[in-house]
Image (cartoon, rainbow, N blue to C red):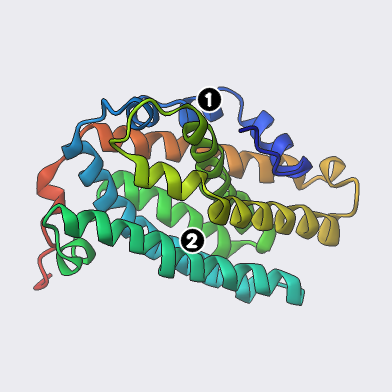
C-alpha cells in the first residue's frame, strides 16, 4: 500500500532525509514485519510507548488550545479520542495478555529516550503555535501510518499481527489523512498557499526532522530493554 498524506507531509519527509528511512525502516520495524523481534523487546517497547501516549495525548489536547478554526479543534479532539480510547487500549490488551496489569503499565518508569521525545513535543507546543506543535507531532502519527501500511502488505509473520493491523488498518489510516489535511490547511491558513517560501518553513521542517530523529532513538530503545525501567517509579520521591 502506498500512502499519500499530502504535499506538506511529503515536503517535510523529504527534508528529514536519511532520518526518515532510519525511522520507518528501523531494525525494530523490520523485526515486527518478519516476526524476529524478541517478545521481551516488544513488551518493553509497549510499556514505554504507553507512557509516551499519555504525554502525546496531552500534546494533542494542547492542539485544541492552539487551534484557530473549528475544523482544527475537531481534528485535535478526534485524535485525542483515538489515542486514549483506541491506541492505548491496544497496548493495555496486549500487555494484559502477557500478564502485565493496567496498573503496572501506567506505573512504568519513563526512560530517558522517552522523556526526551515527549518533552520536545510538549515544549514545541508550549513555546510555539499550532504549526510548531504539528511539526513535532506529525512524524509519529504519519510515520506509524506509513509503517503500518507497508507492513500490512509486506509482513511475513503473524507474530505482531494485531499491532500491524491497527496501524495499517482503515481506521488509523483515516486518522492519518485527517491529521495530514489539518497540517496542510493550518499552514495555508497561517502562512498562505506558498507556505514553503515562508521564513518559518525551514524551522518547521527542522522540528519535523528532530522529532523523526527522536523516533529513531525510541525504536533503538526498544531493542535494548532495560527491565529495571519497567518497574514503578518510587512514589515517595
- Please state which of residues 39 and 137 is positioned toward the viewer in this rendering: 39
Q: Is residue 8 above or below residue 108?
A: above
Instruction: Name the residue located 36 percent from the left edge and 62 percent from the top edge.
Output: 88
Instruction: Name the residue located 21 percent from the left edge and 45 percent from the top edge.
Output: 44
Crowding near pointer 1: few (<14 within 10 Å), some, many (20+)?
few
Image-quadrant location for residue 7: top right
Instruction: Name the residue located 57 percent from the left edge and 37 percent from the top edge.
Output: 209
Q: Which mark is residue 122?
A: 2
Viewport quadrant of the N terminus: top right
Q: Is residue 90 above or below residue 25?
A: below
- Please state which of residues 184 and 203 is positioned toward the viewer in this rendering: 184
> How much space separates mark 2 and mark 1, taking CA atoms?
24 Å
Viewport quadrant of the C terminus: bottom left
Residue 14 point in image, percent of width and height: 68, 29
Q: Is residue 176 above or below residue 27?
A: below
Q: Is residue 232 left or right of residue 91?
A: left
Q: Is residue 172 above or below residue 237?
A: above
Image-quadrant location for residue 203: top right
Residue 154 point in image, percent of width and height: 48, 27
Tell me the SS state at disc 2.
helix
Q: Is residue 120 left or right of residue 203?
A: left
Q: Nearer the viewer, mark 2 or mark 1?
A: 1
**Residue at far right of view:** 193
- Please state which of residues 163 and 10 is positioned toward the viewer in this rendering: 163
Q: Earlier in the sequence, mark 2 or mark 1?
A: 1
Q: Is residue 109 visible?
A: no
- Please state which of residues 175 and 52 is positioned toward the viewer in this rendering: 175
Tell me the SS state at disc 1.
helix
Residue 190 point in image, percent of width and height: 82, 60
Q: Which mark is residue 21?
A: 1
Instruction: Name the residue located 34 percent from the left edge and 58 percent from the top edge.
Output: 90
Crowding near pointer 2: few (<14 within 10 Å), some, many (20+)?
many
Amino acid at each position: 500500500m502506498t500512502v499519500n498524506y499530502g504535499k506538506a507531509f511529503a515536503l517535510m519527509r523529504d527534508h528529514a532525509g536519511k532520518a526518515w528511512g532510519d525511522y520507518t525502516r528501523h531494525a525494530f520495524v523490520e523485526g515486527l514485519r518478519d516476526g524476529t523481534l524478541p517478545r521481551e523487546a516488544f513488551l518493553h517497547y509497549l510499556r514505554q510507548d504507553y507512557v509516551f501516549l499519555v504525554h502525546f495525548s496531552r500534546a494533542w489536547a494542547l492542539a485544541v488550545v492552539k487551534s484557530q478554526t473549528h475544523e482544527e479543534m475537531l481534528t485535535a479532539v478526534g485524535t485525542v479520542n483515538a489515542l486514549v480510547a483506541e491506541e492505548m487500549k491496544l497496548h493495555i490488551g496486549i500487555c494484559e495478555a502477557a500478564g502485565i496489569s493496567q496498573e503496572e503499565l501506567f506505573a512504568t518508569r519513563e526512560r530517558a529516550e522517552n522523556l526526551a521525545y515527549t518533552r520536545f513535543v510538549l515544549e514545541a507546543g508550549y513555546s510555539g503555535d499550532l504549526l510548531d506543535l504539528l511539526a513535532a507531532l506529525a512524524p509519529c502519527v504519519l510515520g506509524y501510518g506509513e509503517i503500518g501500511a507497508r507492513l500490512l502488505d509486506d509482513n511475513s509473520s503473524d507474530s505482531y499481527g494485531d499491532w500491524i493491523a491497527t496501524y495499517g488498518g482503515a481506521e488509523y489510516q483515516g486518522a492519518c489523512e485527517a491529521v495530514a489535511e489539518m497540517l496542510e490547511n493550518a499552514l495555508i491558513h497561517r502562512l498562505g498557499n506558498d507556505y514553503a517560501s515562508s521564513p518559518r518553513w525551514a524551522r518547521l521542517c527542522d522540528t519535523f526532522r528532530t522529532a523523526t530523529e527522536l523516533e529513531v532513538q525510541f525504536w533503538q530503545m526498544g531493542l535494548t530493554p532495560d527491565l529495571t525501567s519497567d518497574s514503578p517509579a518510587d512514589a515517595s520521591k
